[in-house]
Image (cartoon, rainbow, N blue to C red):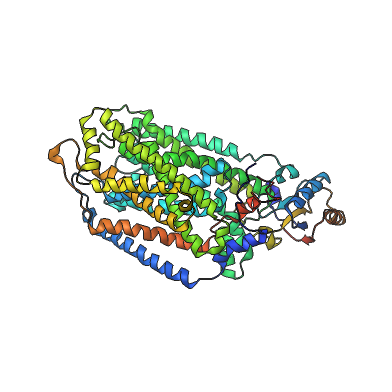
Amino acid sequence: MLKSLNPTGGLVGIWSEEHQVISAAKAVRDAGYKKFDAITPFPVHGMDDAMGLKASWLPWVTFFAGIFGCGFAVWFQWYVAAYDWPLIIGGKPFFSLPAFVPIMFELTVLIGGLSTVGALFVVCGLPKVNPPIIDPRLTDDRFAIFIPETDVGYNVEKIDKLFRQLGAEEIKKIAEF
Amino acid sequence: MIGRAPLVLGRKTFADITNDICAPVEGGTKRGWLSLFALTLVWAGIFFSVVGAIVCIGTGLMGISHPVGWGTMIVTFVFWIGIGHAGTLISAILFLFRQKWRTGIARAAEAMTIFAVMTAGIFPALHTGRPWLDLWLFPYPNQRGPLWINFRSPLLWDVFAVSTYFTISLVFWYIGMVPDLATLRDRAKDKVSKTIYGMLSLGWRGNNRAWSHYESTYLILAGLSTPLVLSVHSIVSFDFAVSLLPGWHTTIFPPYFVAGAIFSGFAMVVTLLTLVRTAYPQFQDYITLDHLEVMNKIIMTTGLMVGYAYASEFFIAWYSGNGYERYTFINRAFGPMSWSYWIMVSCNVLIPQLFWIKSVRRGIIPMFIISIFVNIGMWFERFVITVTSLHRDFLPGSWGMFHFTWADLGLIFGSFGMFLMLFMLFIRFLPAVSIAEIKPVMNVGKEGGGHHA
């Protein structure tokens, strides 16, 4: 996954309709390409299935980071209130768990949320300085499929023919994506 | 089958949507915007002058004294934090419930949340009296022992709740905006805006392998924000409820505060969006009258909820048989500060009931006026809770009064200046409606469309 973030050249087909690009993605996948990607202005529903992508694993990051945040809050409040400098406050026990619940919750959310976003940045290769842009319309009203030249069975003529059959309104070769 | 109201009006193409939403950002600085911005800048200037005076001279400039030690600062803090809740409710909770109508208004509402929480955050920081020592609110190893903070105090829970809320809301808002910032980058004509939006968009390119993770992150952040938003105002209410003061020491506070927060926040969203729609007519197709009507229904419903809370508090004060509790409530309604109680009841419970009438619910001017009343009413609700409980507690010998000073009024008035100034900047430089989110729902409720619905 992370390897596909390195810039490579390849061939791009551009479509103007959402449903066309979904069927194009299916066809490209059926033709045996593995590293191709779809570039769309918004998340196109059904694209993950068409491309054969597995569900994102980022929720696991949230889960474990959240558990860590909660555990850290328990440990830290115990360390502060019961170990490092125990003080009697309001006649409560040093380790007064019910009073620690709000901070446990807040740190679960904070660390869980920030770690998920951090993981998103890593997995998508963000932030990227001066990313190669195929076409400015791809964040507006056009949809594209990009097949990198490192993909199995990459062949310009074959892909060009495939894109043409799939009704691409534009096909171009790009130096890097 | 009952037809669905369209979420986006008019037959639009993807490019139309992009053009419409990017227009205020790309159209250059208009005279109208500039004069309004100058106004809010001066307004915010008043706020920061008063804040400066309070920092340099001291909190004694305000009306707080014995026995009312929590005054304008706390009241206005709770007010602004409450305003923020509507944004998170719209962006996160309605997202989880798959309420597609939220799409048109989510971005602006979330921006409102961020700015409201920023405004709110100033108040407790100043309320400490020595804001340059506010670092002491956070647990850090220090040379005083180390003397740690008291994790059993609700005031400390509040520090964590508000800072977590601000951080997660900001991240949620920003992550949601990244694809739109990439659109602005790709459309930018001049080098300066290309560089700035290029940096802000983090190099987003909209490839599906990234979208797949992005959508899952967005869902997770919505899922985390949902309990978070409910927790924030609950914890704010603990500041009061965990004390032993009559009028504060009640178990109804967390849900009562959350309902009030949503109520006031929706009113602020309506106030702002009616203005945005008037200033930028192209947004009327995205922020439709149907959206506003739904929000007005929510205002009416939550207005009834707070009305129920007021009644239930009164009932419990009598039914508990606790003389102090009963006196506090009689004093609220009929004592020397009863004017504030009746402003609260009329603005929050009575006036929103006008939304039962369809023409009021769908009229821009009536809903704007009602939303202002709700904002006023909700400020007074917090005033009633904070000040009328403090000014007469157990011993008549320690009773007192609260008097506003110019600093109190300057703070309340000025805080709107800061909030509106930030909102003006938002509307000029960032996409006020989510471009990437509105495109998938643009055909909902239309003939021959809506296969996503």
Observer able to see residue A115: no
Quadrant where the image shows the C terminus of chain A:
bottom right
Q: Is residue B315 above or below residue B39?
A: above
Q: Is residue B167 above or below residue B231?
A: below
Q: Position of residue B449 (x, y in %)?
A: 69, 50
**Residue in the picture at 36% in, 44% down:** B349
Say left or right for B341 vs B306.
Answer: left
Q: Front-most of B199 and B393?
A: B393
Q: Front-most of B254 and A125?
A: B254
Numbered-mark total: 0
Observer able to see residue A20: yes
Q: Front-most of B84 and B361?
A: B361
Q: Is residue A144 above or below residue B148?
A: below
Quadrant where the image shows the N terminus of chain A:
top right
Q: Front-most of A110 and B103?
A: B103
Say left or right for B55 vs B230.
Answer: left
Q: Is residue B158 above or below residue A129?
A: above
Say left or right for A14 vs B300.
Answer: right
**Residue in the picture at 69% in, 51% down:** B447
Residue farthest to the bottom?
B31
Q: Quadrant of residue B315?
A: top left
Q: Position of residue B291 (x, y in %)?
A: 53, 51
Q: Quadrant of residue A94?
A: top left
Q: Position of residue B450 (x, y in %)?
A: 67, 48
